[in-house]
Amino acid sequence: MKFPDGFLWGAATAAHQVEGGNFNNDWWDWEQIPGKIKNGDTSAGACAWWKGERYRADFDLARSLNHNAHRLSIEWSRIEPREGEWNADAIAFYRRVLGALRERGMTPLVTLHHFSNPRWLVAEGAWETEAVLPLFERFVTRAVQELGDLCDFWITINEPNVYAFTAYINGLWPPGKKDFRLAFRVLANMVRAHATAYHAIHRAQAHARVGIAYHIRALYPANPRSALDRFATRARDYFFNHLVARALQKGKLIFPLGLNTRVPEAINTQDFLGLNYYFSSRIAFDLARPAELFGRQLPHQLWGVSFEKDLESWFGTGDIDPQGFYGTLMWLARYGNGIPIYVTENGIGDARDEIRPSYLVTYLAALQRALRDGANVRGYFHWSLVDNFEWIEGLNFLRFGLIANDFATQTRTPRASAHLLAQIARANAIADELIEKYGYKDRSRPTPTHHRNRQTIASKKFRRRG
């Protein structure tokens, strides 16, 4: 199961989650509110990239594990700590980080916005008003001017759908609001900001490659025979999976309640498609959840995985479903009409590293199958390189790292799955014996097709092809 020559193998990180000492943004303020973060954890130390410059040792480990690329983000609140003021020390720090990757022969992919906002921007309304557009454009332009000689591979915004849904519908992230109309406005402004940033980057760096990172989750009705479950699944599928993608294709954000918004400037603003994919979910109709489009997510299932162990240590908010990953890649291939695709995040929180090896091999096998079927996938970035601060889950519950981290001592220990991915990256292929060892044993479960003409990826069943 070979991958194309020049395929990018790496892992991903985000500034607020690994640097530590990000005390000037909305997430730090959120961490100070009792009950917002599991166990009262904070990102103060994180992985010691800022104060201890531990990124160098982490990149050494990554290179020893055959990574030839790394995705990271830069922190807006460091570079522009006050409106219109630029921090030379922060810019120098990011130059050292990118330089360290270049020195190790690793391709950097830089994300310009990964959930956190400067405190001064929040005071001005952040993404709730169109005033954010020139501010983001100014920041992006400055970042590319300062760092563009070390990077030409940019993601404008990470998971705008997740940001809008979790911060403005569920209210679990800052600013903690629950307002569907406001969530839609935030989403529209993020689409506009991506378009503005896309053109600003190309003005500053003509040869740049610019994209956005979609978070897509395969959705299934809990009961396929229930019209209400199918309705709730289609509604969430459209809002969560399709709205931003269609806006960047059609130049319109289309939604009921008089919320339609034209964004013609967003058309043709993707040089590549970034995909963050983890799990699938089953959705049941729930009249008590109008703000969540009358949909309730069911508890996870380990589809096709024969584990009978304590699963408290893994990220159980969705179903392990490599077929959904394959379907998503094929949908993106049709949607993008040949535009390169990069898997910019994919992983599982598994402190014991019991499920990750099987997850890794079966998802990569699904990716390789998509390649055989015509998807133009150019790279894979595992989430994450090292255990880090996982937002509201804090430090010690979700362990996504290929490399384990003892936060008290900042001691790093590569997990077995890190060496497994290293073996695949070194060969640029999945050996048959890995499929035999880690592949799913139960191949009888039904699996769905993915998006077809705005329909949910849950309507048609077929058996997994070997």
Image (tube, rainbow, N blue to C red):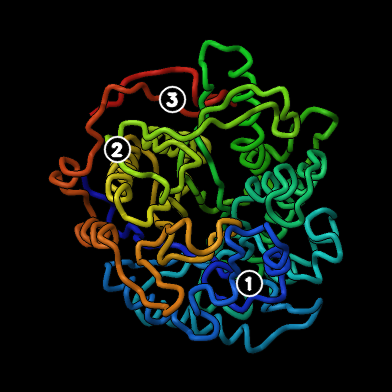
Q: Is residue 103 left or right of residue 30?
A: left
Q: Residue at x 62, y 29 (%)?
A: 296
Q: In the rendered structure, which amino acid carries the disc numbered 2?
A: Glu
* Disc on the earlier residue, 3 or 1: 1
Indicate whether 38 appears above or below 69. above
Q: Is residue 434 left or right of residue 301?
A: left
Quarter the C terminus occupies: top left
Residue topped by disc 3: 449
Is residue 116 in view?
Answer: yes
* Disc on the earlier residue, 2 or 1: 1
Q: Residues within 10 Å of mark 1 (few under 14, many from 20)?
A: many
SS at circle 3:
loop
Q: Position of residue 108 (x, y in %)?
A: 46, 70
Quote the CA–CA distance across marks 2 and 1.
41 Å
Q: Residues within 10 Å of mark 2 (few under 14, many from 20)?
A: few
Residue topped by disc 1: 75
Q: Residue at x 41, y 69 (%)?
A: 107
